Image (tube, grey):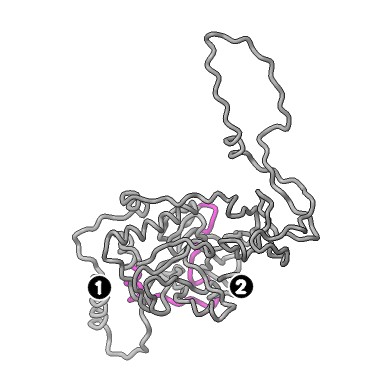
Amino acid sequence: MAPATSSSSAKRLIRFSGSLRRTEAPRLPSSPLSPTPKKLKSMEEVMARARYAVVDQADYGSVGCEQCGSGDRPDELLLCDKCDKGFHMKCVRPIVVRVPIGSWLCPKCSDRRRVRSFSQKKIIDFFRIQKCCDKKDKFSSPLDARKRRRRSGSLVLHKKRRRLLPYIPSEDPARRLKQMGCLASALTALQMEFSDDLTYMPHMAPRSANQAKFESGGMQVLSKEDTETLEQCRAMCKRGECPPLIVVFDSCEGFTVEADGQIKDMTFIAEYTGDVDYLKNREHDDCDSMMTLILATDPSKSLLVCPDKRGNIARFINGINNHTLEGRKKQNCKCVRYSVNGECRVFLVATRDIAQGERLYYDYNGYEHEYPTHHFV
């Protein structure tokens, strides 16, 4: 909803459960064979399922923030569509980055779904983990891969470039189950499905629209060695050997990601996945996790990744406040777009060594400077 102002009237949502009047129907003579009348629902059940109606109400210029008590900065003051209480975007927990386009409910009224716990079998089913086979993995270790590169390399000298490193999963299977369980609980709380691939849904952008050649100014191509690293990480994920990351809930930032083990610089962390859609279809969407996939010369061909229905752990890695020095110091990974077999893919890569327990952050405005990060902590 729009922020509260003193110059314009606001809208308030109230419930109704049907007609405005209630009349009594004439009673029919009872029959001994007539079925037992059904038990009526309680008022609590009726009100829990009642719809909302929007009615005009007097202006809310006198409303203040429930957290700080101030009515200043009315352009940042949100009104809950259920309780009519006001909250500054930066005071509410978790904070709200941008003004919601539709209705908005405060944390108390939102009835956030309880975080579920998952058994081992449910975790395996949720992530569709494949059983390990006895075949030796094609990518047995990064050392073997480097040996193959040296044997197959030519004598021509090339400029040394930094290669992507595969992540090292936790050795303890119980620890990996906990990591996947936390991710499954977070996805379920947001009513999302797990997907480690870009998805192309009907009435959105088709796969044929994802062509790296549409990128304005061109796009860097993922090298053969880095492609091998990518495939190695994907194979590990399918076996249930996930990155050493854990999803936690912070009262200020919401769901966020912490390193559950040492992560080295230039380590592949995750691919940013979700539904692929045209930018023009999402211009008025207030989803706070959309990622640029293609910035085309023709704006009608620009694409986004929208992880509102499907996604993976990349959905929960938070951004930095790039308006402050302290915010920029927190950055420890970056977002990189590559052309892989002609299609654009978005990867998150570590930009320095990350210690266990450290939270992951990257710059949401790595390619564009349109995302409002000044409210970020």
Label 2 crowd bin: few (<14), some (14–19), many (20+), radius 10 Å: some
Quick one: SS at disc 2?
Answer: loop
| Magenta span | 202-231
User: Can residue 371 be spotted in the picture?
Assistant: no
Quick one: SS at disc 1?
Answer: loop
207 inside magenta stretch: yes
Number of marks drawn: 2
37 inside magenta stretch: no
Percent coordinates x, y for residue 11 in the rendering: 73, 51
Q: On the image, numbered disc 1 is attached to which residue? A: 141
Distance between the alpha carbons at the discs numbered 1 and 2: 42 Å
Q: Quadrant where the N terminus lies?
A: bottom right
In this rendering, the answer to whether 174 lies above or below 164 is: above
Which residue is the extreme one toward the front? Answer: 69
Residue at position x 23%, y 80% in the image = 147
Q: Quadrant where the C terminus lies?
A: bottom right
Q: On the image, numbered disc 2 is attached to which residue? A: 374
Percent coordinates x, y for residue 196 in the rendering: 40, 60
Task: Pick whichever of labels 1 and 2 is earlier in the sequence.
Answer: 1
- The nearer-to-camera label among 1 and 2 is 2
Q: Is residue 312 left or right of residue 285?
A: left
In this rendering, the answer to whether 226 lies above or below 5 is: below
Q: Is residue 159 left or right of residue 308?
A: left
> What is the three-letter code of the residue carrying label 2?
His
Percent coordinates x, y for residue 22 in the rendering: 71, 27
